[in-house]
Image (spheres, helix red, strand yellow):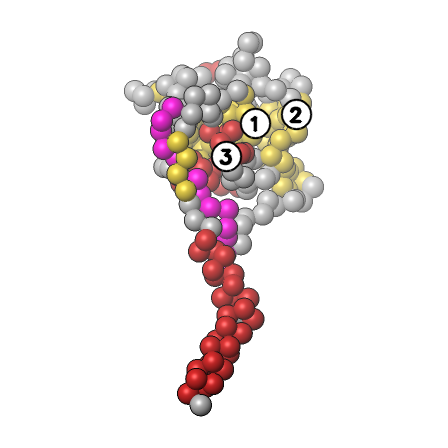
Amino acid sequence: MKIITLTLLLVSLLGQIFASPSIVNAAAETAATDFVYVVKRGDSLSAIAFRYGVSLNALVQANRLTRWVIQPGQQLTIPSRTVSSGVKPASPAKNKSIYVSISQQRMYVYENGAQIRSYVVSTGQRGHETVPGNYRVKTRLSQAWGSAWQFWMPSWLGIYDVGRYENGIHALPVNTSGQVLWEGSLGAPASYGCVVLRGSDAAQLYQWADLGTPVIIRY
């Protein structure tokens, strides 16, 4: 009788485990953990993020990177793509969009089909032209580090890759001495490919723009 009772109890418990979606989901989420990737020669952050199906922004934040330069042998944490129960990934607002006119050196911001703001900008100078196209905001960082030029780029919204680097929208850059660069050049091409705004405008745009917000760049 004790053996039969114990057997029935085990069957009952197993039935509950396999019948309960919450328990099955919890087990699946536990299995999907972060792991460490060792950087190889020729790797870039964007290529690694694409390879493992995570956003560049998530990869940067998981490793608390301030400089976007990686070295062979460096260890990077690849964040899990599993979203824990009750937490939903942010979805881009479909009623928002950003339009940049290279010829006018202006940015126009739209919400619900209406223009809500316009900003004076500087796009890429000769030899470093901003590339026209249809993009989306794919990274957001309060401060991005431009290792090639040794300056900070506040209110960073990344939009497309250029080799191992990323071009984006950001405030006027600040060098390691705290000097704001290109301040007198707004309204004319001046950057190394990014779309640059004055600090207060970039901060306002950064707070408004979501990941996935469309960015249209035209001549």
Image point (44%, 43%), residue name: 79
Question: In the image shown, does 85 or 67 lie closer to the viewer?
Answer: 85
Circle 3 — which element? helix
- What whole-number distance in Å separates the C-alpha atoms at marks 2 and 1? 10 Å
What residue is pinned by disc 3?
A: 49
What residue is pinned by disc 1?
A: 160
The relative height of residue 214 versus residue 71 in the rendered view (above or below) is below
Image x and y of residue 58, in percent: 46, 40
What residue is pinned by disc 2?
A: 133
Quarter of image, res 127? top right
* Residue 100 horizontal side relative to residue 80, left or right: right
Check the picture and name the quadrant holding the C terminus.
top right
Sequence-earlier tag: 1 or 3: 3
Circle 2 — which element? strand
Image point (60%, 24%), residue name: 106
Q: Amino acid at mark 1?
A: Tyr
Image x and y of residue 51, in percent: 53, 34
Residue range corresponding to the magenta coloring: 72-87
Circles 2 and 1, Cβ within 8 Å, touching? The answer is yes
Circles 1 and 3, Cβ within 8 Å, touching? The answer is no
| Residue 174 appears in the picture as rendered | no
Circles 3 and 2, Cβ within 8 Å, touching? The answer is no
Image point (42%, 87%), residue name: 2
Tell me the chief SS of the magenta region: loop
Q: Amino acid at mark 2?
A: Gly
The relative height of residue 138 versus residue 193 in the rendered view (above or below) is below
| Residue 92 appears in the picture as rendered | yes
